[in-house]
Amino acid sequence: MSSGTEPVTGSGGGPGRRRFLGALTGVAVAGTVSAASGCASPTEAERERPDRAHRAHRDPASSAAHRPRGERPLFLGTYTSREGGGGGIGLAAYDDVTGRITGTGTLTGVPDPSYLALHPSGRTLYAVNEREKGGVTAVALSPSGGHEVLGTRDTGGAGPCHLWVHPGGRWLLSANYASGSVAVHPVQASGALGERTDLVEHSEPPPGPGQQGPHAHQISTAPDGRHVLAVDLGNDTVYTYRLDEKAGTLSRVSHVTVRPGAGPRHLTFHPSGRFAYLANEVDNTVVVCAYDPATGRLTPGEPQPTGADGGTNYPAQIVVTREGRFAFLANRGHNSIARYAIERGGARLRLLDTVSVDGDFPRQLAFSPSQRLLFTANQKSNSVSVFQVDGRTGNLRLTGKPFTAPVAVCALPL
């Protein structure tokens, strides 16, 4: 199985794998983490109770009370099984004005945490374990910095690359890239995960050109919270589900297949909830989709350019400002961010320009809660770049040299 940093020949169709705000301002990010079993998968006993071995040591000098004013927590996803990769979830702090990042340690005991998400309560962090036997791991966050791994649950598939906490906070959704399926886990009162309640395989429609099977790349909820959408790169399809919030099961209500060979990777909604923007990895395009909240149905428009000037690009993630005026797209091959003006109430994207990320292979984008800053996780250059965002014009300005982080594939600023 390919874990997603390099183009997959024949079966993957391109590099494959791989929210929130100030509730965690008081969470310390410092502390070295000890782990008796390194990055090995938790045992069954560990899955049923908190693993006391995987805890962040408290470091009084870097706790919330001692952090410089204006610094906030930053968590970094990586691959632990890859040469030159990290040892777990990277811990850092960033200045919300200057964008300066300070590394503070590593939370070990979490294998291949390539994508991260936060519970709405702000008390629990979740990570995928992007391995052949996929898993999702819960981490209890502590204001003192003593973060604690609560355990791991199987996703029932291979290579999970994305996860999402349902807005109600009671369910965790995850996407298995290599096996083309999506899973549901209950969230317990402690933040730990219960046994999986559902696993849905994308068995149809058939795979797109150059693909040997489905590849679920993203799962998220629509802004109204009524529908769950799963983006599948392998069969060029976006599925819409309803989540039974009592049973934790998914039922399909519709699906839309984009043009053959597009390779849809990531979907982001406009704040109005009436439009969504779909980044297509394989054919290097972006599509504006109309969205019907009543039915959950997407209606794709015409493909648009990503601003890459020829060559292999593999666009990755697209993000939208909260007022819905600008969108930004990570261009991995072009090593840039494409800037778009959003017009006609969300119905139109107009390409403005591209901005260099000063790194290689920007895998993921993330706003700070204030949206004054935009982070890019640059996988091949082992770095994280930070941009200041002009909310009036959408202009981006690098805050300084990129921060060094091993195989950086996800940045989660809080």
Image (cartoon, rainbow, N blue to C red):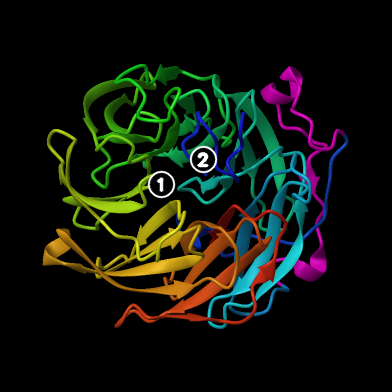
Q: Is residue 40 magenta?
A: yes
Whether residue 322 can be seen here: yes
Which is more toward the observer, 214 or 98? Answer: 214
Characterize the magenta stretch by its predominant secondary structure: loop
Q: Write down the residue under mark 2.
A: 16
Location of residue 78 in the rendering, given as x and y in whole percent from the top left corner: 66, 49
Q: Residue at x 45, y 40 (%)?
A: 164
* Residue 279 placement, left or right of 316: left
- The amino acid sitting under disc 1 is Glu
Location of residue 54 in the rendering, given as x and y in whole percent from the top left corner: 79, 40
Q: Write down the residue under mark 1.
A: 281
Q: Which residues are magenta?
A: 37-65
Q: Residue at x 42, y 71 (%)?
A: 371
Q: Secondary structure at mark 2?
A: loop
Location of residue 248 in the rendering, given as x and y in whole percent from the top left corner: 39, 22
Tell me, yes or no, whether the two marked residues, 1 and 2, touch with CB atoms within 8 Å: yes
